[in-house]
Amino acid sequence: MKNKIFLFMFFLILLNSCINNSKTNFVHANELSNNTTKIIDQLIEYGEITGPFVGESGSRPEQWDNFIEFKKNATEQELVLLIQHPHPIIKCYSFDLLVRKQNKNTFEILKSSLTDSSAVYTQYGCIGNKTQVNDYFIRSVLGFGPKNEYITDKQNNILDSLILFQPNIISDYKNGLLEDIEPKKENYNRIRNLGLGGNKSAVVGLAKFQKIEDFKIIDTLLHHEYTSIQEYGLRAVKNYPDKVFWNSIKNIHLKQIKKSGNFDYSLIRVLYQALVQYKNEESRELLELTLNEATESALKYHKEYIWVALKKYPDKTYSGIIEKMNFSEYDLNNLEYELDI
């Protein structure tokens, strides 16, 4: 018991030390006003970024009041300096305010921060999330609009190019760009190198080139032990529905329809959207197999995601499948929301 108490006290001391270091270990600390310094300490102590309402009750968090005070007191000169602050919360709040003020340095600050993958926690309403500073900065710039005067189409293209092809940038936004990228010949080798280096989203984008020499890269994902990795392989197949992947698709499908619990909803959703890209009798037979042999507890979810796949990618090959699932009007109204996900 004494050891547990000692460890707990040691943890508190260590945590307090880290917080204090974040407050004081800032090279421009002497250039800040006393009011700004005090508010920064309060922002750090709260520990996350929030909106004006949090939780199921929609209560106003203390952090929002801290942010309002920060907004009132911090000058633009201070905000620019605070981008270099060691604590990610201060960086993000400062950058948000610079964007709102349309500060002329914002684009250059964003470019210089693209490799900052330090974690920051956010809470908006009931939704809590962990993101990275670079992703937060990108969303901040792209989120206020319709357009900010410092983000022109040319600058947006520069930004996307920097994010895509700098290997030391790790970002959810980058992964989204890779998955949505157009298969231009001049980009193939760089995307392939990212895929070979372990970027799973790059493999999804690589599949759009539909080259047989990339088969092994995609199939490795399909055979991974974790379904979260298999899902990337299925996204790739959705872009490249070649017969070489068919046995892998069948194996994943069979395993999923035999489950009686712990369903991989995201995987199942992508599975059927990949499957219907084949537009052949064999793929129709797998849909029929689902309806006839899926476990009772799994069938509901499989039917829903088959419906979504056939609505998003209709083809005469699958004529009559939707009717066989006998959805009620109430069910169909609810399913319409799934199409936007």
Image (cartoon, rainbow, N blue to C red):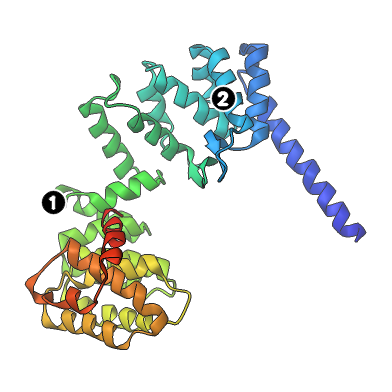
Q: Gap between marks 2 and 1, in whole Å?
A: 47 Å
Residue at screen point 18% across, 71% down: 276
In the figure, 29 relative to 1: above or below?
A: above
Residue at screen point 30% across, 26% down: 145
Q: Amino acid at mark 2?
A: Phe
Residue at screen point 24% across, 24% down: 152
Left or right: 68 with respect to 147? right
Who comes first in sequence, dot 2 or dot 1?
2
> How far across and how far down the image is residue 130, in percent?
51, 46
> How far across and how far down the image is residue 43, in percent?
62, 29
Task: Give the crowd class for mark 2: few <14, some 14-19, many >=20 residues within 10 Å.
Answer: many
In terms of secondary structure, where does tag 2 sit?
Answer: helix
Which quadrant of the figure contains the C terminus? Answer: bottom left
Instruction: Name the residue that disc number 1 marks.
Output: 185
Q: Splitting the image into 4 quarters, where does residue 312 fall?
A: bottom left
Left or right: 325 with respect to 27? left
Q: Splitting the image into 4 quarters, where does residue 63 fall?
A: top right
| Residue 67, disc | 2
- In-front residue for pair 42/119: 42
Query: In this view of the protein, can residue 318 be seen by the observer?
Result: yes
Left or right: 31 with respect to 339? right
* The furthest residue to the left: 316
- In-front residue for pair 273/310: 310
Residue at screen point 42% across, 80% down: 297
Q: Splitting the image into 4 quarters, where does residue 212 fall?
A: bottom left
> How far across and how far down the image is residue 192, in percent?
26, 57
In terms of secondary structure, where does tag 1 sit?
Answer: helix
